[in-house]
Image (cartoon, helix red, strand yellow):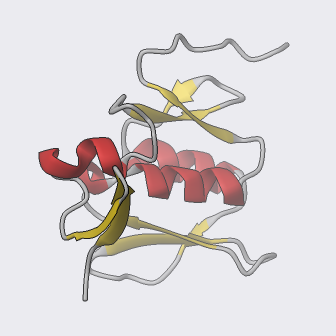
Amino acid sequence: MAGVWVFKDGIVRRVENPGSEESSSAGDGGGGGRRKVLVHVPSGEVVASYEVLERRLRELGWERYLTDPCLLQFHQRSTVHLISVPRDFSKFKLVHMYDIVVKTRNVFEVRDAAAPAVSPAT
């Protein structure tokens, strides 16, 4: 059974496609529908493609892992962590961004797309 359980207005229901318009306000986790971006904090660069993400992860010692037809996966030899993202960047969602943030402490950050970039401290 696929889908996500959503609690809204005192009612719990299962949503098949949490990215659809019908569920966008409920599925964002209170984000208010604002678009989010993943930012490489040291450089202030917005991750706008998998090429940027892979370059930044390689700098941190992450390597591409396996060749799954649906996923891009990265791992570090020194940890058990595995970062998995959909091969299609248009399906790169907030949950994937936070997964990267958690596994690369203080290197990436999720921000509102409209928020101005903060220049790194020198």
Nearest the eye: 120 or 3: 3
Nearest the eye: 82 or 12: 12
Which residue corresponds to the image point at 47% horizontal and 57% vertical from the top-left?
A: 96
Left or right placement of residue 86 versus residue 98 in this view: left
Nearest the eye: 18 or 89: 18
Q: Quadrant of residue 48?
A: top left
Nearest the eye: 18 or 8: 8
Which residue corresponds to the image point at 77% horizontal and 41% vertical from the top-left?
A: 106
Figure check: 23 above or below 118? below
Which residue corresponds to the image point at 50% horizontal and 15% vertical from the top-left?
A: 115
Count of numbered tags: 0
- In the image, farthest residue toward the front: 10
Q: Position of residue 77 (x, y in %)?
A: 74, 78
Q: Position of residue 41 (x, y in %)?
A: 68, 30
Figure check: 102 above or below 122? below
Figure check: 60 above or below 32? below
- In the image, farthest residue toward the left: 21
Q: Position of residue 92 (x, y in %)?
A: 35, 53
- In the image, farthest residue toward the bottom: 1
Quarter containing the N terminus: bottom left
Left or right placement of residue 40 versus residue 17 in this view: right
Which residue corresponds to the image point at 34% horizontal and 49% vertical from the top-left?
A: 9
Q: Position of residue 44 (x, y in %)?
A: 61, 23
Figure check: 70 above or below 55? below
Q: Quadrant of residue 56?
A: top right
